[in-house]
Every structure is written in C-alpha cells, then in structure tokens.
Image: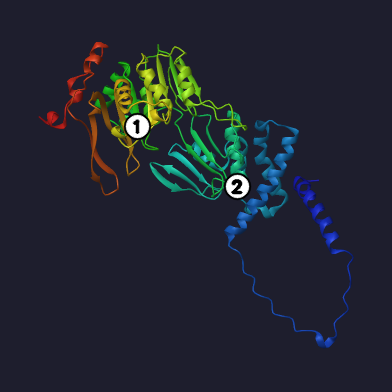
C-alpha cells in the first residue's frame, strides 16, 4: 500500500462508519405520478474559483498529509535531525501518487514544516533576516517587523492561536519559565540573546502576542555606531576615556532607542583584567571579556513565591567582589542599592533607565529611590545621586527611525537643592530632507568637564580638539 493511501485510509474509515450510522437503512420513496413531474431546471453556470484559492487549498491538504506522516515518523524516532531531511522525500512521494497536488507550492510547505520543527515557526525567516531589527506578532494573522527603522506589515501568518502558543512555549520552556492563564506575561530570550516578551489572552485581546527585539550575532562595537551616525569619533574617544577612568555612567532613553546596544558597546571598553558582574531581567548583554558573571532575575512560581528581583541581585553582587557592576535596566527600588554601591567604592558601574532627557532621568531616580520604602528627605536623595553618577548619556530614536546619542551630560554636583547638569556634547536637529531623513549635527558644546583632572590622574589624556566647537574648528 502506498504512503498516500495509508494516510487517507484512517480518515475515510472513520468518515464511512459515521455516515452509515447517520443514514440508517435505505428506504425507497414511492415513484411520483407523471403529472407531478416537473420540468428539469436549467443548470447554473459553474463559476470557477480563482487559481490562487485552489492552490492554497492544495497547499493546506498537502501540508496536513505531511504533518501526519511527520508525527508517525516522530513516534519511531525522536531525532529531529533524522526526520527533517525526509520531509522533501515524503512530499515528492505524495505528489507522485496523487497528481492533483502538482499545483501545490512544495518548497514553501517543506520550509514551513522545517521551521516548525527546527526553528520558531513562520517567524523563522524574519529572525534570519539581518535587515529586520524587531518582530511583532499581533495574533496569528498580523505580523509586523521593523526593517531599517520603519514598521512594515509582513505576509507571515500562523495557522491559529494554538500555533502562536506553541512558538511561545518553545521559546520559554528551555529557560524554565512558563506562560498560562495564571501567569499570562513572560520575558525571555532567544539562544542568540534576542529579547522576547509574550502576553496571552485574557490580557491580550488580539490573541497571543509576541515582541522580539533582535540582537546581532556579532555585537556592535563603537566603530559601528560611528558609522551608523549614532555618535561622532570625538564622542567615542570621550566615552572610551570615561569608562577606563572608572566613572559611573547612566544610559537613558525611550523604548527602542538603543540603550542596551550602547551599554553593550560601553562595556567593551572595560579592561579584560577586571571582574564584571551583569544584572538583568532577561540576560541579553554580550560582553567580550573573559571574566564575566551574568545574573538574571527570576519571576515567582505558580504559588506566587520564589521571586528573585533585580534589587536582590544588586545586593548579592556586592558580595561577589566585582570590579564593575553592569545593570541592564533600573526601574524600581534597586535604584537605592545601586546608588549606595556607587557611593561606597564600586566605581565604574554602568546602568540604563527610561527617560526623555538627562534632567528627567534624575527625577525618575529620585522617584525610584522612594519606591524602596525608605523615608529619606529629597535633599539626601539628591546628594546620593549627585555623588554617585558622573555622566548621563541620552539616547533617542528619531522620526526617521535612526538612533542618535543626543546628549552626553556631566553631573557636576549639588548647588543648594538643585543637581547641576552640564552638556558636553549635544545633537542639534535642523529639519527633514526630501526623503524624510532627519537633518542634524552632533557637536561639542566647548565645555571641558569638571572631572577632566580625574581622567588625567588615571593616565588618560584627551586632546583638546575633542571639546572644540564647530566655530573653533572653522576658525
């Protein structure tokens, strides 16, 4: 018996039995008298369906048959590497036995089934596309991606909600995390470090929703950011000096502005003979040094217990003899522990946070310290912030999708009750060109930072040209 016959036999047997039970014994109806016989009605013209819809139907039928055969193969062998090469052969054999499948897109079907087995289903081609930086699955039928800074609706579709759920479970299961009705939100990561957020019904009304922030397999270095126009060579020289001089630096910006990428680049300036402890919600930093210890927070279990927060990890990291503490994102009470660590000898720490400007970042830090439940006067909190943080790097995602470091700001100290900030570098936006690209310029303000002596005492010399304004260069 052929492969196709075996696959169809199981379906037809069940359908035949069901139809026999429903029909019961066949009864003959009495013949109608001659007078009652009606004239035969003319046949309606047959309207042919578009070729595309019939091809889609063939694709679905062929895919269903192949799926059954794969399931049978998986019962005999759990090794996916053995099964995947056979999918093409199975498809060819089925098409040979039933010529009605000749119009089906065999390559597309085989690729989809292979992606389901070895990758992450229909979104696998987007994950492999270097031009795609973000993937957004809004239910089974609407998948968007960010391509070169712009959101685009793709032609990728899932079978149904269960298919999307299967992909989510495939992502979170290896990490020991779960997503279900009792825990309908989850943060996770892909094997390449890409960040994943998933949220499912009843919280998501569109169906299971996945958001993936892709990371490059080869992490960006400072030269890449200069080439992209994110910052200038002078800014790169300045940031390199700040990291090596063990200044405490904070990267602030909005969602998708490139904070984590910048933090990763800054981390690569840390000398390789120092011990680095990284703390994140979902581990995504890609550091090139050998001596790196990565810590990751843990959500509560099904009973609501066992959660390990970023704040717990910050406290624990101080007992691990770190030369540098790198915090993926500060968003709560851990801000107080971070500031205390920076003020008690843990210099050279790096962190990120959400804000629209360096001044807003200072205000947010004050609020986050109060979230720790410690009743401190505002002036005491500001003294902690002014004494802890040396430099704030503001990153922004502009209207055309490009990402820029719009300000590098020095925290100079406290005067009265006000924290004094001084911009060292800024980005001046001048408008849009005919293609919608932002026209602007990164420039120095001409101010040399107060901690310049600290750089020199660390053996780091920066040319005065780095701090020259546009007018001084022209003169």
Which mark is drawn over residue 161? 2
Q: Position of residue 189 (x, y in %)?
A: 52, 31
Q: Secondary structure at mark 2?
A: helix
Q: Position of residue 236 (x, y in %)?
A: 28, 25
Q: Residue placed at 16% from the left, 32% from the top?
A: 470
Q: What is the C-alpha distance between the residues marked 2 and 1?
A: 36 Å
Q: Residue placed at 72% from the left, 35% from the top?
A: 74
Q: Position of residue 103 (x, y in %)?
A: 62, 54
Q: Is 256 rendered above or below residue 462? A: below
Q: Position of residue 429 (x, y in %)?
A: 24, 41
Rendered image coloring scheme: rainbow
Q: Is 156 rendered above or below residue 312? A: below
Front in this rendered view, residue 115 or 293: 293
Q: Secondary structure at mark 1?
A: strand
Which mark is drawn over residue 252? 1
Front in this rendered view, residue 221 or 253: 253
- Of all residues shown, which one is farthest toward the bottom? 35
Earlier along the polypeptide chain: callout 2 or callout 1? 2
Position of the C terminus by quadrant: top left
């Amino acid at each position: 018996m052929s492969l196709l016959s075996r696959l169809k036999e199981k379906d037809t047997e069940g359908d035949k039995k069901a139809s026999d039970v429903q029909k019961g014994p066949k009864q003959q109806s009495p013949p109608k008298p001659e007078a009652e016989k009606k004239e035969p009605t003319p046949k309606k013209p047959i309207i042919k369906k578009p070729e595309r819809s019939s091809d889609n139907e063939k694709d679905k039928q062929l895919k269903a048959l192949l799926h059954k055969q794969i399931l049978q193969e998986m019962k005999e062998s759990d090794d996916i590497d053995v099964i995947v090469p056979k999918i093409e052969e199975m498809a060819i054999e089925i098409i040979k036995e039933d010529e009605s499948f000749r119009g089906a897109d065999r390559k597309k079907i085989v690729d989809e089934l292979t992606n389901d087995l070895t990758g992450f289903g229909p979104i696998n081609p987007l994950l492999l596309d270097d031009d795609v930086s973000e993937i957004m699955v809004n239910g089974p039928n609407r998948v968007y991606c960010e391509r070169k800074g712009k959101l685009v609706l793709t032609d990728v579709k899932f079978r149904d909600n269960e298919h999307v759920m299967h992909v989510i479970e495939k992502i979170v299961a290896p990490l020991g995390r779960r997503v279900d009705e009792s825990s309908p939100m989850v943060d996770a990561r892909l094997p390449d470090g890409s960040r994943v957020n998933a949220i499912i019904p009843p919280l998501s009304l569109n169906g299971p929703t996945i958001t993936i922030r892709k990371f490059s397999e080869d992490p960006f270095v400072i030269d890449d950011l200069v080439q992209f126009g994110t910052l200038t060579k002078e800014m790169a020289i300045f940031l390199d000096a700040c990291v090596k001089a063990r200044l405490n630096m904070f990267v602030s910006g909005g969602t998708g502005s490139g904070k984590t990428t910048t933090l990763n680049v800054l981390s690569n300036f840390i000398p390789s003979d120092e011990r680095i402890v990284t703390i994140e919600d979902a581990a995504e930093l890609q550091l090139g040094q050998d001596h790196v210890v990565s810590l990751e927070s843990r959500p509560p279990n099904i009973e609501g217990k066992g959660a390990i927060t970023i704040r717990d990890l910050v406290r624990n990291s101080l007992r691990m003899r770190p030369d540098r503490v790198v915090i993926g994102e500060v968003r709560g009470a851990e801000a107080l522990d971070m500031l205390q660590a920076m003020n008690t000898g843990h210099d050279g720490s790096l962190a990120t946070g959400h804000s629209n400007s360096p001044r807003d970042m200072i205000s947010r830090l004050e609020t986050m310290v109060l979230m720790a439940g410690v009743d401190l006067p505002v002036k005491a909190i500001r003294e902690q912030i002014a004494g802890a943080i040396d430099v704030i790097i503001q990153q922004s995602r502009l209207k055309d999708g490009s990402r820029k470091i719009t300000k590098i700001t020095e925290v100079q100290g406290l005067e009265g009750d006000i924290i004094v900030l001084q911009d060292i570098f800024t980005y001046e936006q001048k408008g849009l060109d005919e293609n919608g690209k932002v026209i602007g310029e990164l420039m120095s303000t001409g101010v040399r930072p107060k901690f310049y002596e600290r750089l020199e005492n660390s053996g780091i010399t920066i040319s005065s040209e780095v701090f020259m304004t546009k007018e001084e260069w022209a003169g």
